[in-house]
Image (cartoon, rainbow, N blue to C red):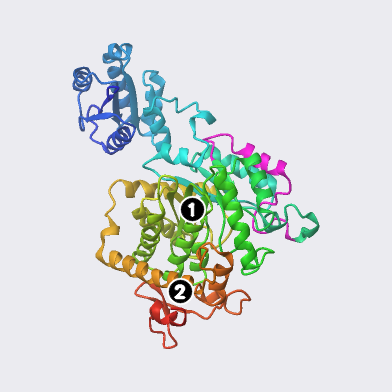
């Protein structure tokens, strides 16, 4: 086993500001270093002597006071430590931009950090990489590899697509250069989702409606090429609403699609977003899950939040999360991305949101095994943003801080401009920087909200109620030799009968839309005609 490398760090001279030093050492520990913190206002001689005594491979110093004073101190430090440098010890400096600029000019330090570098860049230096000159090979180009590479930080994703190819390409270049995202999710317009291979069905008046109007494989290649800079973010896009396998093949060939996002009940005639009826679309979605699973590509089912955005009760939300994960496993997916959209409905409290997501994880964790892994992805509610910009920024940060209680592997950032306009590249960079700070604050020592007795009690209540709902689905299943949870006819029937239901589905040809819900004590509950909370055993009595 190789010897653990040692780094000694301190604030030098008369400088007493050590927050940056402590953060650097925390990253060093994550990168596998043994760390020694000498504290504030450390004399040059003590720093050098400690590094010698500890046989340290690195000596990191900080200075955040007057640039002129700092320049003289660092010149003296460099002269005194020259023998250590000649012996192979690495030297790092961190300080304010004016002091860092002067430290850089000395030509002594192997790395100079002025606060503008991302934690990925600091980690790269600590891993022995040249963080200033990095290529695509330095950044994992698959989702699971990127998750492992970045731990304990989640990888970051944002949706992006403007009404023209030119503006979208320029925006992707800008986002990649900013090095703030790991995944850019391409927002493509409705005709690209539904009619990519059917130009005769496309309507020129809809071009750019909802995203970038990609019309050929070369368009996708051009978007991918725009991302080949900065931190080389991965790209991914919708699975479409028709021609699923044909689109999947093209996505892999053109943008190396990071993962597939496939619904179970949605993106069809039921929600007006595709040509298939409900039962037929479920079968087609299952086929494309299997296609991606056979190729070892992760799959996300963007399922539960579609119920939540239609004011479905928490129990239906969690039941759909279970059915999504269950189908993914049944159809051969190996790496399943469990998406958990907070603030859906928007009036849900943080505590009840966390309880709902904890219930989703608890009820699906039994599905995990050596061949089926669940990766947690959280996001802010699409419909929850206030219009006023400062309030929206606060909502973004506070929502992501709450999401961190689930220790997500992926954070899907929903930009603070969502209530006003589709995010520009500049909006996304701003949103990502806010998100990164909220994440760093949480990882520095967030209270364990999953142990809150109110959250635990609500989690267990939801899980118990979901079991009742799932039993109702079993009971309507006609073929006792097949699996009710993967049978497309049974799943479609569960919506038609109102077992899986949401208020916004009223007057829908494929669903009941008769369920009533209210926010009670921060949770979204099914209620009776008197607006009183009802249990699933009462709501579904005829099927039990």
SS majority, magenta? loop
Q: Going by the picture, which residue comes out furthest to the front? A: 481
Q: Does the magenta stretch include residue 239?
A: no
Left/right placement of residue 42 relative to residue 346 reads left
| Horizontal and vertical percent position of residue 112 | 38, 27
| Horizontal and vertical percent position of residue 241 | 65, 58
Query: Can the viewer see residue 347?
Result: no
Of labels 2 and 1, earlier in sequence is: 1
Query: Can the viewer see residue 113?
Result: yes
Q: How many labels does the image show?
A: 2
Q: Determine whether 499 is above or below 54 in the image.
A: below
Residue depicted at 72% across the width and 41% down the height: 218
Give the magenta range.
206-233
Q: Residue 472 carries which label?
A: 2
Residue depicted at 75% across the width and 52% down the height: 197
Dot 2: element: helix
Q: Pick whichever, 394 or 188, lies toward us.
A: 188
Q: Pick whichever, 243 or 383, lies toward us.
A: 243
Dot 1: element: helix
| Horizontal and vertical percent position of residue 417 | 53, 58
Left/right placement of residue 279 relative to residue 205 reads left
Mark 2, Cα crowd under 10 Å, few <14 / some 14-19 / many 20+, is many
Mark 1, Cα crowd under 10 Å, few <14 / some 14-19 / many 20+, is many
* Residue on which disc 1 sits: 329
Residue depicted at 66% across the width and 44% down the height: 249
Res 508 → quadrant: bottom right
């Amino acid at each position: 086993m190789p010897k653990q490398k040692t780094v000694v760090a301190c604030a030098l001279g008369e400088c007493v500001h050590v927050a940056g030093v402590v953060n650097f050492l925390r990253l060093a520990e994550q990168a596998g270093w043994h760390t020694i913190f000498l504290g504030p206002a450390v004399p040059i001689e003590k720093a050098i002597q400690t590094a010698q005594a500890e046989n340290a491979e690195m000596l990191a110093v900080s200075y955040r006071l007057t640039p002129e004073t700092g320049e003289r101190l660092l010149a003296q430090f460099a002269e005194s430590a020259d023998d250590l440098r000649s012996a192979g010890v690495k030297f790092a400096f961190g300080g304010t931009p004016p002091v860092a600029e002067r430290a850089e000019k000395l030509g002594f330090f192997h790395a100079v950090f002025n606060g503008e570098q991302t934690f990925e860049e600091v980690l790269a230096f600590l891993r022995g990489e040249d963080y200033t000159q990095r290529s695509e090979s330095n950044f994992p180009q698959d989702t699971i590899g990127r998750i492992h590479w970045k731990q304990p930080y989640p990888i970051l994703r944002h949706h992006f697509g403007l009404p023209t190819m030119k503006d979208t390409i320029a925006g992707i270049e800008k986002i990649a250069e900013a090095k703030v995202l790991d995944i850019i999710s391409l927002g493509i317009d409705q005709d690209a989702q539904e009619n990519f291979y059917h130009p005769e069905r496309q309507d020129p008046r809809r071009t750019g409606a909802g995203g970038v109007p990609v019309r050929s494989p070369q368009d996708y290649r051009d978007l991918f090429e725009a991302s080949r800079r900065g931190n080389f973010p991965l790209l991914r896009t919708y699975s479409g609403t028709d021609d699923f396998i044909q689109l999947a093949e093209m996505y892999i060939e053109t943008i190396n699609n990071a993962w597939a996002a496939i619904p179970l009940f949605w993106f069809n005639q039921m929600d007006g977003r595709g040509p298939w009826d409900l039962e037929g679309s479920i079968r087609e979605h299952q086929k494309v899950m299997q296609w991606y699973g056979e190729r070892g590509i992760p799959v996300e089912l963007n399922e539960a939040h579609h119920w939540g955005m239609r004011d479905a009760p928490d129990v239906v939300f969690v039941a759909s999360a279970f059915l999504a994960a269950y189908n993914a496993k049944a159809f051969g997916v190996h790496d399943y991305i469990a998406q958990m959209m907070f603030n859906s409905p928007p009036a849900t409290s943080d505590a009840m949101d966390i309880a709902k997501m904890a219930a989703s994880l608890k009820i699906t964790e039994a599905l995990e095994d050596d061949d089926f892994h669940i990766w947690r992805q959280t996001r802010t509610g699409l419909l929850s943003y206030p219009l006023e910009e400062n309030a929206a920024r606060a909502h973004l940060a506070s929502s992501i801080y709450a999401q961190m209680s689930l220790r997500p592997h992926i954070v899907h950032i929903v930009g603070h401009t969502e209530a006003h306009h589709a995010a520009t590249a500049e909006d996304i960079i701003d949103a990502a920087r806010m998100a990164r700070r909220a994440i760093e604050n949480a990882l520095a020592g967030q209270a364990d909200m999953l142990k809150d007795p109110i959250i635990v009690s609500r989690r267990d209540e939801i899980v118990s109620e979901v079991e009742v709902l799932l039993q109702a689905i079993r009971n309507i299943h006609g073929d006792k030799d097949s699996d009710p949870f993967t049978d497309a006819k049974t799943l479609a029937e569960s919506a038609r009968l109102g077992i899986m239901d949401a208020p916004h589905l009223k007057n829908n040809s494929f669903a009941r839309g008769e369920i009533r819900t209210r926010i009670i004590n921060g949770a979204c509950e099914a209620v009776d005609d008197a607006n009183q909370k009802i249990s699933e055993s009462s709501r579904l009595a005829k099927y039990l």
